[in-house]
Amino acid sequence: MLSRHQCIVQLREAGQAMLSAARNGEWEHVGDLRERFFHAAQAVCAGKPGPQEQADMASAIREALEVNREAMSLCQAEYDERAARAGGLTRGRSAVLQYSRNRGK
């Protein structure tokens, strides 16, 4: 079993890996890394912390929240961009369909 300190280190590493993948557009990896990040966060919060661990945990949790916010923001931006492109495709298909229908008239 890992110590709380080791779990905090894993949480920070998982968070940075997830952010790096999101910043680089490596979306196929972000989901797996988010899962690793989530499990590391659970491990950090497991059990009753001692007095010194409480301060370390609080700091790690604040950092994790910020990492999660940034990752979600990056994912939302990618989602919005893909939705806009898909909307353009839909409008293009609709225009072609309308042109095809009206071509013979």
Image (tube, helix red, strand yellow):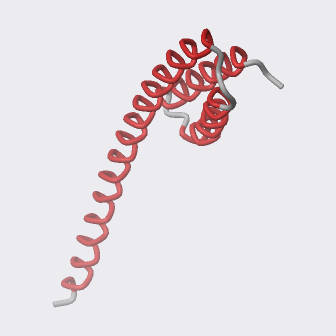
Residue 74: percent from left, percent from top: 40, 34
Q: Residue furthest bottom?
A: 105
The count of marks equals: 0
Of all residues, the one furthest to the left in this rendering is 105
Residue 87 left/right relative to 13: left
Quarter of the image where one finds residue 105 = bottom left
- Picture quarter with the N terminus: top right
Q: Is residue 76 left or right of residue 49?
A: left
Left or right of 98 in this view: 44: right
* 15 vs 27: above or below: above
x and y, in percent, of residue 87 in the image = 29, 59
The residue positioned 33% from the left and 60% from the top of the image is 89
Rendered residue at 60%/24% (across/down): 17
Instruction: Judge by depth and name the residue closer to the eye, 103 or 44.
Output: 44
> Relative to the observer, which residue lies in front, 100 or 22?
22
> Which residue is painted at 64% across and 35% down in the image?
42
Q: Nearer the viewer, residue 78 or 44?
A: 44
**In the rendered image, the vertical position of residue 104 relative to residue 99, given as above or below:** below
Residue found farthest to the right: 1
Please determine whether, in this image, residue 14 is positioned above or below residue 98. above
Residue 24, percent from left and from top: 50, 27
